[in-house]
Amino acid sequence: METDSSDVKPFSLLIKPSSADCNLRCRYCFYLDHSSLYPQTRRHRMSEETLQRMIETYMRTKQQYYTFGWQGGEPTLMGLDFFKKVTSLQSSLGSPGTVVANGFQTNGVLLDDHWAKHFADYKFLVGVSVDGPQKLHDRFRVDLGGRGTHAKVMKGIAALRRNNVEYNVLTLVSKSNVKNPEDVYNFLCANGINFHQYIECVEFDSKGQLCPFAITANEWGEFLCRIFDIWYKHDVYNVSVRLFDTILAQLVHGVSNTCASGTSCDQYFVVEYNGDVYPCDFNVTESLLLGNINSSAWEELQTSETYVKFAADKTRWNAACGVCPWLRFCNGDCPKNRIGRNPGSLSHLCQGWKMFYSHTISKFEALAEQIRLRDGL
């Protein structure tokens, strides 16, 4: 593979430089078991050779901007020097005028002023996992010894704030906190956190049964409705909730800005520590291995039969979706939430989504009209 400047569709990278390795043992984590894909070693770290190959070939493709998302496992296990190498390579390999965006999703435990200064210097957008106040967060987000991590995470966020790092908080909605939406929302706002992402915890066991920590459709719908009510009453112009921003973007501009609500699953590639490439964070499985960046061109990966089929499965939804008034917002929901992971099945959360959209749509439409008038659209 010598060049990769061919006509590829725009895509971003979601990189797992330490694979599934993590310094926590969150009781709902779906990715920890993925370490079994690479049993030859217990410690997984991306080499400098693979790192350079990935950045170099990606930045030879034609993109409006180059988006690198660093996740895990836990990416801080790579050490700060690794990410200094990342930004050095991005600077040296990019042509003049190249726009690079780095996102960094972390549990926050190892963050300090050294990390935060580097993030600030290179304008990383940092996402930190916080499931609400300590009593809710520490039920599932524990370290290797089973101890809660909330205090360390909030200390890490303080370091980000001291160094003026742009950050948001990702809250996984599980059995731990699904009954306490106001407590979660108010805690985040009280701590000056004004950029929220609420992610549904939906996991099934090997028999197809819902895991004990996962939530039901009705729980999800009620949680979102209650979050919306408090946001709409107090914080429409003060707090960004990613789901709400997405709905408004769909109403105002007719486009979705999130993967789950899009019409196809071909927006990014997952790159594992050794260069293996997969189509989706929730589908890092042997059967969906697309290739390896050390031997495959991005165009080859993007046009592979496996990837094309995977992308198209998003719109192979249940017949009921075709006549549903909310299809324009959810597009059948993320395939990982479809019962049995069958593209033709309804989402496990379908009734919850219907509850939420029915409860909020008139207010979203009114807000969208205000935005159109404000922006002269």
Image (cartoon, rainbow, N blue to C red):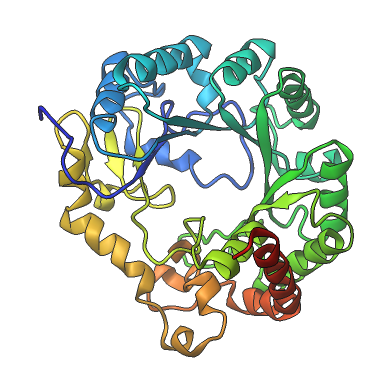
Residue 323 at x, y percent in the picture: 48, 90
Q: Residue at x 56, y 24 (%)?
A: 123
Q: Residue at 23%, 30% (x, y): give it.
A: 60
Residue 9 spot, x, y in % from top left: 27, 50
What residue is drawn where x is 89% and y is 57%? 234
Q: Can residue 347 be seen in this snapshot? A: no
**Residue shown at 47% from the left, 73% from the top:** 332
Residue 334, percent from left and from top: 48, 64
**Does the rendering let one see residue 90?**
yes
**In the rendered image, which quarter is residue 153 located in?**
top right
Horizontal side, residue 20 vs residue 54: left or right:
right
Q: Is residue 270 above or below residue 230?
A: above
Report the quarter where the N terminus lies: top left
Q: Is residue 187 left or right of residue 272?
A: right
Q: Depth check: give the residue in front, 159 or 65.
A: 65
Image position of 187 (left or right of 90): right
Of the pair 268 and 166, the residue shown nearer to us: 166
Instruction: Classify 314 as above or below 23.
Output: below
Image coordinates of residue 199 in percent, x first then y, are: 63, 54
